[in-house]
Image (spheres, rainbow, N blue to C red):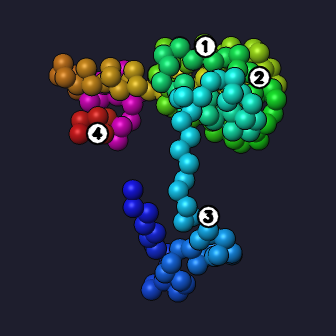
Amino acid sequence: MIPLLFCHGRASPWPCALNWLDLFSEPDLARQLYSNAFPLIDVGAMADDIIMQHRAMAILELMFKHIQKRDLAELTDPLVKLIAAEYNTSEQRDALMHWIMQNSDSAQPKMFLQTLARQLPQHREVFMTIAERLKEEGRAEAQREIAQALLRKGMSPEFVMEITGLTKPELKKLRR
């Protein structure tokens, strides 16, 4: 890894120091902090019960460790405990839930969210909003697949738009 700092602002040439450490309010402290080796934290090697003790970082560490699991339902109990403990802000929790849904390979993400919503009724709205978004994304993907199949069969673009509800620009994107 090679850390690089790029300037892309309006001021050119860059009007400040070219050494990024000099940009900190306490450059000497920054030099001390960033000149040492960074510790590697291998969450995969940590026991879940140890991770659960890490309060605000626990939910993130737990998800990093288990995000590749096919069945997220196994994580329902620890997630419920961590979310109920309110170690994280609502923004952090919501962002993490969106990240989980985008990056997990869960077989049944909607069921997972419904289970969380039942066990954490105070957060039901957030979980169900995410579930609705997943449903809408699935519907949109199905529309695109149907449109592509119809176009391959020689159906007219007008017919495909009528059947799928896709717009002309959306249909053009599919043809690329």
Q: Are dots 1 and 4 in contact, CB under 8 Å?
A: no
- 141, 46: nearer the viewer: 46
**Inter-mark Cα distance, 2 to 3:** 34 Å
Q: Amino acid at mark 2?
A: Lys
The reply to whether callout 2 and callout 3 are in contact (CB within 8 Å) is no
Label at residue 172: 4
Which amino acid type is marked by label 1? Answer: Glu
Of tags 2 and 3, the one toward the viewer is 3
Magenta residues, as a range? 157-170
Viewer-proximal residue among 149 and 60: 60
Q: CA distance from mark 3 to mark 1?
A: 38 Å
Mark nearer the N terminus (1 vs 2) = 1
Q: Which residue is mark 1?
A: 74
Quickly name the residue at label 2: 81
Give the structural element (helix, strand or loop) at label 3.
helix
Number of numbered tags placed on the structure image: 4
